[in-house]
Image (cartoon, rainbow, N blue to C red):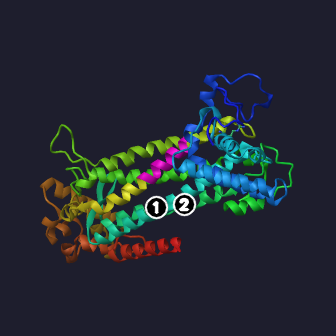
Amino acid sequence: MTEDSPSIPQADAEDKLWGGRFEGATDALVEAYGASIAFDRRLYREDIAGSIAHARMLAAQGIISADDCDAITTGLGAIEAEIAAGDFEFREDREDIHLNIEAALAERIGEPARRLHTARSRNDQVATDLRMFVRAACDEASELLAALRRALLDLAEREAETVISGYTHLQRAQPVLLPHHLQAYEEMLTRDAARFRAARATANVLPLGSGALAGVGYPIDREFVARELGFDAIAANSLDAVSDRDFVVEFHAAAALTMVHISRFAEEIVLWASAEFGLVHLDDAFSTGSSIMPQKRNPDVAELARGKSARTIGNLVQALTLLKGQPLAYNRDLQEDKEPIFDTVDTLLATLAVVAAMLPNLRFDAARGREAAAGDFALATDLADHLVQRGVPFREAHEAVGSLVAECERTGRTFEDLTLDDYRAAHPAFGDEVLSLDIEASLAARSATGGTAPERVAEQREAARARLREESA
Ligand code: ARG
């Protein structure tokens, strides 16, 4: 039906659906200031699903007739198709997605549309829509997280033998397997996945049936609606139900922390791709050039991922700040919950996808990794451990090796240049196995659970794959 349908008065400003007690028109500035249709149109599917479930319940309970219910559900189905096809005209004077759809339904089916809002308020309606949206976002995030975790494990498998320097304080510390380092990120993302499952559970409670704030006086069946819409439970307190946005905060928190983990990894890619580290080379498809410096190859994806984490952190803080001053129950402030969560969902999902795609394109320079792993006396702890095995107290061993390092630095030598006599001068307990101490021995020695010994790292990887399979089962 078109805008000039005879049953609908088409003044410049049509009567508001809430306009009964008003005589004057809304100021144009106020209308523009309050309209959320530009962004909350994104909730149209959830809004229509919620309305269909509500109408079916009203009919099942004898609150509206079966015929009215049929007209409503058919009309809503047509509107959904129209919106999906891009043929729907969203109107700012109709404020938000709820009123746009309800007014369009009235144009289309007339009288029955005016019964749809029985036993419902936009306050429980919008809370329901947003919970469905966040629930779906949690599922998408979990799937993309699983793909990223798989990509990390595949890369770890491909680089099973690659050794790099491990760092503390960004100073070369001890050799580690590159897979051990990559799998550390897989651990973080596994915890993130659990946080999205928890956020989903928090979101999956049905507010509809709470009315504006105090509950409704019709014989509704909230369990029916919960079943129709896939909610696990119904909200127990109507005041809480219409004003609670904890699920928004929990989603933001899970997303911001995931983005912080990705940002840390991105920072390492940026470092590793520099000439100073020289550890990784980015394929053409995942790097960009400079418009002025012809030689440049920049790790833009990593930089953007690191940069985009900032807005997700900002959005988390926005949500907490939005809530802190609000008295019960619904306040219009809550309309401000939407743009940031849409932004975070888009940022998170795009980042998870692009980083997963980037991983197979990383080419590591294994020789360079090995050089760094053995450089700067990185085997010093192993020398001290060697003395400890021969009965020397650890603190004494630490001191003896420290003096060896100082001696080497003074004379411009590395451990490889030292003779057994040099070692024995630092401590008499050194045995000749010190001369064959190398990176492989250092790695193999760290064989306690969680360590970088090759068989431990392979076990950790298998365990990670097993839990991924379990999660998707
Ligand atoms: N657009 C509103 C929001 O996003 C919908 C609820 C409006 N409720 C009201 N009583 N004005 O929060």
Q: Which residue is label 1 attached to?
A: 145
Q: Amino acid at mark 1?
A: Leu
Q: Amino acid at mark 2?
A: Asp
Residue at horizontal 46 percent and vertical 53 percent from the top: 349
Taking depth in this image into account, of 440 and 249 the one nearest to the observer is 249
Residue at horizontal 62 percent and vertical 52 percent from the top: 78
Q: Does the magenta run of residues contain 349?
A: yes
- Asked if the beta carbon under badge 1 is closer than 8 A to the nearest atom of ligand 1, the reply is no
Residue at horizontal 26 percent and vertical 72 percent from the top: 161
Note whether 341 is above or below 60 in the view shown. above
Note whether 298 is above or below 176 in the view shown. above
Residue 215 horizontal/vertical position (percent): 82, 48
Which image quadrant for residue 390?
bottom left
Q: Which residue is label 2 attached to?
A: 139
- Mark nearest the camera among 2 and 1 is 2
Residue 11 horizontal/vertical position (percent): 67, 27
Residue 293 horizontal/vertical position (percent): 17, 39
Q: Residues within 10 Å of mark 2 (few under 14, many from 20)?
A: some
- Asked if the beta carbon under badge 2 is closer than 8 A to the nearest atom of ligand 1, the reply is no
Note whether 454 is above or below 254 in the view shown. below
Residue 211 placement, left or right of 143? right
Taking depth in this image into account, of 6 and 338 the one nearest to the observer is 6
Which image quadrant for residue 372?
bottom left
Please state the quadrant of the image where ligand 1 appears: top right
Q: Which residues are magenta?
A: 339-350
For residue 184, which numbered disc appears in the image?
A: none
Regarding mark 1 in the picture, which secondary structure is present there?
helix
Taking depth in this image into account, of 390 and 48 the one nearest to the observer is 48
